[in-house]
Amino acid sequence: MKDKLYIIKIGGALIDDKELLNEFLKQFSEIKERKILVHGGGKLATTLADKLGVEQKMINGRRITDKDTLDIVAMVYAGGINKNIVAKLQQKKCKAIGFSGADANLIKAKKREHAEIDFGFVGDIEKKSVNRKLISKLIKLKLVPVFSAITHDKKGNLFNTNADTIASVIAQALSSKYDVELLYCFDKEGVLEDVDNPESVIKNISEDEFSTLKNEGKLHKGILPKLENALGAIKNNVNKVFLIKETELKNHIENHHAGTEICL
């Protein structure tokens, strides 16, 4: 029987709220099974860019990562945020160890290719991008990897990579060795049919249901990348995938009934 492994992704809104983050990390540190944490960015990168006078370029809602922006996101994501999370987990007696994808060549990315838009230093990854053998060794040592959304190409370049994708791809890579459960934690009760009604949680979503909801315009655009990455995971042998409210982590682990489950 495979050992259980939780891969848990948290986003910017949680990172920006010190009290909520502390409570979440307390719940995370109490998980007895093997676990990995993946975190996004928060507002700090944008705030710092404004202070330094670095203009943030967006095309169709996607960030263009030029060299100046890359320097800032690498400092903030792989530096400040990652190390603060690791320090808070150490305080809670959790043996956390912080990584970017460049560390020990854990996640190797390719520069995003696009016919019309140059996204700059944005890296795309897939299942084989992940050094699963080394991550497995770290887990065996009872260490808790904490990943930022920074990757590299083994040619000396760092990249900004979507944190939802990093969580999905790590889950896919480790699913042959572990019974993986991937949890996307965010500030809603789950996927909502009506974004203004927290009671309208959709309990299960399959690929067909996702297409229908998307075509009917019922899904908030911020949830789309999460759902696409969640479906990618479930189609690539990840055992269970849920989208849950970040305050419900402990409840979900113990009682298994929070949020929205992604199904085949």
Image (cartoon, helix red, strand yellow):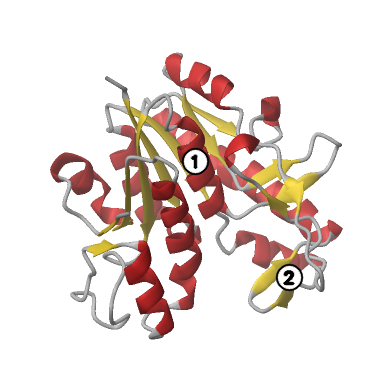
Q: Which type of secondary structure does the marked residue at label 2 adopt?
A: helix
**In the picture provided, is 44 more to the left or to the right than 49?**
left
Question: Any mark on residue 4, and which?
Answer: none
- Residue count near mark 1 (Cα–Cα under 10 Å), binned few <14, some 14–19, many ≥20: many
Name the residue at 46% across, 39% down. 171
Amino acid of disc 1: Ile
Q: Earlier in the sequence, mark 1 or mark 2?
A: 2
Name the residue at 68% across, 25% down. 104
- Give the Cα distance between marks 1 and 2: 24 Å
Residue where numbered disc 2 is placed: 50
Q: Which type of secondary structure does the marked residue at label 1 adopt?
A: helix
Image position of 30 with respect to 167: above or below: above
Query: x and y percent of residue 91 in the render?
Result: 41, 30
- Residue count near mark 2 (Cα–Cα under 10 Å), binned few <14, some 14–19, many ≥20: few
Image position of 201 with respect to 10: above or below: below
Residue where numbered disc 1 is placed: 85
Query: x and y percent of residue 195 in the render?
Result: 32, 80
Residue 13, visible in the rendered structure = no
**In the picture provided, is 200 more to the left or to the right than 152?**
left
- Quarter of the view holding residue 178: top left
Residue 260, visible in the rendered structure = yes
Q: Nearer the viewer, residue 40 or 201?
A: 201
Name the residue at 24% across, 81% down. 197
Image position of 100 with respect to 258: above or below: above
The quadrant of the rendering that contains the N terminus is top left
Amino acid of disc 2: Asp
- Quarter of the view holding residue 181: top left
Image position of 231 with respect to 83: above or below: below
Query: x and y percent of residue 142 in the render?
Result: 41, 18
